[in-house]
Image (cartoon, grey):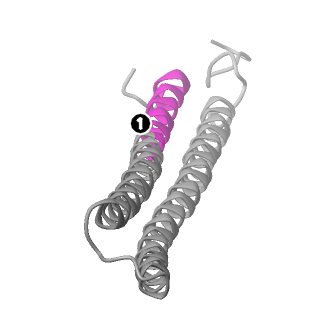
């Protein structure tokens, strides 16, 4: 075409390519941002999981202490009862033995309840921590897949995808 544009309607052989490259760079930056946001969210979930695991460990420690404390208290109480019976001249038979047996039974039940409650509480913390760890993994994976899809969409929309 005499006096016309031999390079196409854009007037330059660089115009369309540069705009496409700029768009592709923008899409790449947006994709990296998606990955980073996913990583930060996952880090928050991981932090929450660690806090819950620490709480579960603390519950287990407290259970051991409470069971020890209950054992010491039980020995002291039975000893005091035996001393009281001895000081009063009561022979350890019949009602006196029944009182000691009842005391030991109640203390044993208390110890079992402490153990059961602590185990239930620690298990709840463990399950929640596992859920947060799973959420962290899935968030990272979703962010990476989303970023890749976003980037690929940018590649194909700019014409670099083999149009």
Across and down, in percent, residue 69 comes to 49, 78
Q: Is residue 146 magenta?
A: yes
Residue of label 1: 145
* Structural crowding at the residue carrying mark 1, measured as other residues with C-alpha within 10 Å and reported as few (<14), some (14–19) or many (≥20): some
Disc tally is: 1
Q: Give 105 or 34, whichever is nearer the viewer.
A: 105
Q: Is 17 drawn above or below residue 96 in the view shown?
A: above
Across and down, in percent, residue 99 comes to 38, 61
Q: Give 17 or 48, whichever is nearer the viewer.
A: 48
Mark 1: secondary structure: helix
Q: Viewed as shown, does residue 128 lie left or right of 8?
A: left
Q: Is 76 drawn above or below residue 13 in the view shown?
A: below
Which residue shows up at 59% across the image and 42% down it? 34
Across and down, in percent, residue 13 comes to 62, 33
Q: Is residue 72 magenta?
A: no
Q: Is 22 drawn above or below residue 56 in the view shown?
A: above
Q: Give 1 or 72, whichever is nearer the viewer.
A: 72
Overall secondary structure of the magenta section: helix
Which residue shows up at 68% across the image and 33% down it? 19
Taking the view exactly as shown, the residue that stands out farthest to the top is: 1
Taking the view exactly as shown, the residue that stands out farthest to the left is: 93
State the image quarter where residue 79 is shown.
bottom left
Q: Give 29 or 57, whichever is nearer the viewer.
A: 57
Quadrant containing the N terminus in the rendered view: top right
Across and down, in percent, residue 76 comes to 47, 83
| Residue interval drawn in magenta | 139-159
Q: Viewed as shown, does residue 7 lie left or right of 142?
A: right
Taking the view exactly as shown, the residue that stands out farthest to the front is: 89
Q: Is 156 drawn above or below residue 148 in the view shown?
A: above
Quadrant containing the C terminus in the rendered view: top left
């Amino acid at each position: 075409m005499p006096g016309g544009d031999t390079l196409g309607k854009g007037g330059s052989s660089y115009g369309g390519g540069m705009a496409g490259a700029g768009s592709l760079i923008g899409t790449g930056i947006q994709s990296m941002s998606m990955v980073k946001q996913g990583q930060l969210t996952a880090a928050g979930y991981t932090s929450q999981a660690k806090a819950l695991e620490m709480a579960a460990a603390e519950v287990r420690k407290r259970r051991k202490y409470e069971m020890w404390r209950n054992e010491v208290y039980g020995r002291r109480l039975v000893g005091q009862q035996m001393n009281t019976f001895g000081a009063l001249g009561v022979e350890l038979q019949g009602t006196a033995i029944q009182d000691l047996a009842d005391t030991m039974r109640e203390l044993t039940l208390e110890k079992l309840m402490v153990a059961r409650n602590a185990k239930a509480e620690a298990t709840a913390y463990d399950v929640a921590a596992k859920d947060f760890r799973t959420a962290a993994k899935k968030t990272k994976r979703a962010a990476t897949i989303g970023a890749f899809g976003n980037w690929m969409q940018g590649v194909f929309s700019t014409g670099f995808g083999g149009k």
